[in-house]
Each structure stands twice: as structure tokens, then as C-alpha cells.
Image (tube, grey):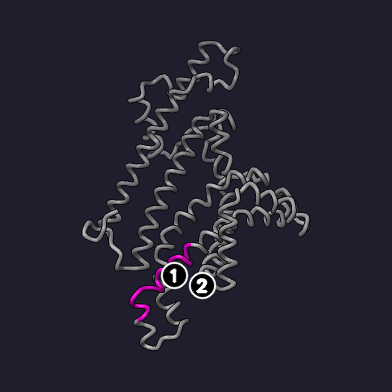
Amino acid sequence: MIRYTLGRCGRACITIFLVLSIVFLLMRLMPVETYFQGRSDTMTDTLKENILRGLGLLDPWYVALPNFWKNLLLHGDLGESIVMRVGVPVTKVIWPKAVVSFQFGIISLAIQLVIGMPLGVLMARKKGGIIDKAGNLYVLLINSLPQAVYFLLIQLYLSTLLGLPMLFKSSVPSSRILPIICLSLGGIASNAMWMRRYMVDQLNMDYIRLARAKGMTSGQVAFRHIFRNALVPMVQSLPASLLFTISGSLYVESLFSINGMGGLLITSIQRQDNPLVQAMVLLYSVISVLGLLLGDLAMMLVDPRITFTKKGGSR
């Protein structure tokens, strides 16, 4: 396990290094007028040169790239915003929005797990029954309808029915309810569908027949054996889901006017705030790679029989 963990961490670091280096080099190919915030015509050539030199854009790439990594690794310096909040470190731009998105995300993730996984268990145990049919209908509707459709229906009709605010206001706690519902619906359907599928697969295994032959009740078989083994593949996605809560939802945050992470990357790209784009790419890269790594490790902890060696099936 230690050898595998170290190997995966090494590959993760290489992946992040390559992704961020490529983004850094590509951003240097952007037109330099971006850095003058539309004031290019009113600025002297000397002033333009000083701005570009201060940003390191006049250095060749083989000088600028090591300087970028040195500042990042030694000082944690990701640069300053040049458009959205001029002169403010990008970490101070990102952090407040990340906190908002994380608050919504962590609540919605908890709801997805508390409702979705037990629903999947009930659907598997009552296969072919009313609960299973109703659950499958819910999963089908959520997966077939575009999110924009049922998000708008929730915002327009549920707000009127329950008397809730249509838009988010930090000073109004009830304005968080509708966005959280929207963020939770897809996860509930996904968790229920996969938990049902994994449990149904386990029902046909030989060890289940043996457990029943030994006199174990249906409840004992379901929770001691079927649920435990079905939980193993579900565990892999939990760390990634937890980490991705910080990234926010572009559509939900736009729909409910939530000032979170969802639209920050898009806005920074559109306004060509290059240091902010680099910082956001670094954040998403770390989240993606770390989520996959923690998912694999979580599977090994839940089921020690799982290994990732070449003989057992490499990953």
C-alpha cells in the first residue's frame, strides 16, 4: 500500500506540473493588450513595457516558467489579479467564493448520501415492488430531463408553493433551501441507481446463497454482506465528490445569483485575467487528481483484499 501510495502521489505531482506548465505557456500566447485593461491607446510604450516586464512577459519562456514555479513552491505566490480585482492576490479573490460554494456543496453532498444510498438499498431489497418502480421513475426523470428544465421549475413553482426566496441572499437563511435542493437531486438519483445496481449484482453471488443456507435472515444477509460489498465501489467516488463541492455549480449559482466558484473560472477566462485563470486551473487540477487518489485509497481501506499491484490488476 505504501509503495502504491507513493507511486500514485508521484504521478499526481507530475500530472499537476504538466497541466499547469502547459496552461502557463499557453497564457503567454494571449495578446498583450489583455494586460492593459482596454487602456492601450492611452498608455505610452514605456509604461506598457514596464507592466509587461513586471509580469515577467518579456522574459523567454525557459526563464519565466522556472520563476513561476519557484514563486509558487517557495512563497505560495500565484500572482495578482490584473482585471477583476487589480493588484489583489488571486488567493484572496478565490477564497471567499470557494467558502460559499463549499458550504452549499457539503450540505447537498450530505443530503445525497443520507437519502440516495438508503433509497438504493430499499430499491434493491424491494426489487420489482412499488418502491423500486418509484425510485427507477425518479432516476429516469432526473437523468433524462435537462437540468435547466427542472431547476427552473423548482425556482418558479416551489418558491411560490413554499414561500421561499427565488434568489440567494446571505442574510436570509431560507434562500439556501432551493439551491441545495437543485444541487442534491442529481446526486440522490446517482447514488440510488448505483447502490441498487451493486446490491442486485451481489444478490446473485454464491456466498449469498451460502449465507441463506446457513439460516441467516434477509436483513442480516442484506446488511452484513450485500450492503458492505456494494459499498466498496461507492466509496471510491466519495472523496472526489467531497472535493468537487468546492468547485461549485455554474448553472445553479448563476440561476440563484450565488457569488461562488461556479462562474469564476468562466468570468476570468472571458475577461482574460490570466493569473486568476492559472490559479483556478491549479485548484481544479489538484482537486481532480487528489480525488482520484483518495478514492483508490479509500477502497483499499474499506476492503483490504483490494490491491493495485500488477498481478492483481494494475490501475
Give the CA separation, mark 2 to mark 1.
8 Å
- Return the x and y of residue 124 as percentages of the image width and height: 49, 71
**Amino acid marked by disc 2:** Lys
Residue toward you, 76 or 96 = 96
Up/down of 12 relative to 211, above or below: above
At label 2, counting other C-alpha atoms closer than 10 Å, the crowd grade (few under 14, some 14-19, many 20 or more) is some
At label 1, counting other C-alpha atoms closer than 10 Å, the crowd grade (few under 14, some 14-19, many 20 or more) is some
Total numbered circles: 2
Q: Earlier in the sequence, mark 2 or mark 1?
A: 2
**21 left or right, relative to 152:** left
Magenta segment's dominant SS is: helix
User: Which residue has dot 2 on it?
Assistant: 127
Give the residues in magenta: 194-209
**177 left or right, relative to 194:** right
- Return the x and y of residue 33 as percentages of the image width and height: 53, 19
- Return the x and y of residue 59 as percentages of the image width and height: 38, 21
User: Which residue has dot 1 on it?
Assistant: 200
Tell me which residue sits at (35%, 42%) in the image.
Answer: 15
Marks 2 and 1: CB-CB under 8 Å? yes
Which quadrant is the N terminus positioned in? bottom left
Kindly state the secondary structure of the residue where label 1 is placed. Answer: helix
Up/down of 161 relative to 9, above or below: below
**Amino acid marked by disc 1:** Val
